[in-house]
Image (cartoon, rainbow, N blue to C red):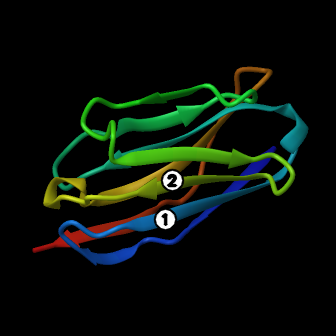
Amino acid sequence: QVQLVESGGGLVQTGGSLRLSCAASGSIRSINDMGWYRQGPGKQRELVARITTIGSTDYADSVKGRFTISRDNAKNTVYLHMSSLKAEDTAVYYCAARTMYSDNYWGKGTLVTVSS
């Protein structure tokens, strides 16, 4: 079992920055990829960014150049640094982890609200 706890969400103005953190615990040695997903009002959950154990990254087109995902394996934590935030970035952001056994785990989410 893997437990994921997100933090860092909140209210930010358009054009501002915010950093999300996700701390993993439990069977952390089984974790391969980690990522961030989001679900905006009335929208389906979508991938924002993901990172492998060796640091390879992948981003949604809508956040490329504005968001950066990083991972501190020593702290079992993954980060999402968000800049140049737009109203359409408003969503609940979820941390996700995929293990070597192909099990998927989710955090409970953290709300990011971007206001003009």
Using the image as rendered, state which of residue 57 and residue 11 is in the foreground: 57
Local secondary structure at mark 1? strand
Asked if residue 2 lies left or right of residue 56, the reply is: right
In this rendering, the answer to whether 112 lies above or below 51 is: below
- Image position of 81 (left or right of 44): right
Instruction: Answer above or below: position of 17 versus 105.
Output: below
Q: Quadrant of the C terminus?
A: bottom left
Q: Does 8 appear above or below 74?
A: below
Q: Residue at x 18, y 58 (%)?
A: 86
* Residue 80: mark in rendering: 2
Most extreme residue toward the top is 101
Left or right of 21 in this view: 76:
right
Q: Residue at x 20, y 44 (%)?
A: 43
Q: Position of residue 96 (x, y in %)?
A: 58, 42
Q: Quadrant of the N terminus?
A: top right
Q: Residue 17: which quarter of the image?
A: bottom left
Q: CA distance from mark 2 to mark 1?
A: 6 Å
Q: Amino acid at mark 2?
A: Leu
Question: Which residue is denoted by mark 1 in the rendering?
Answer: 19
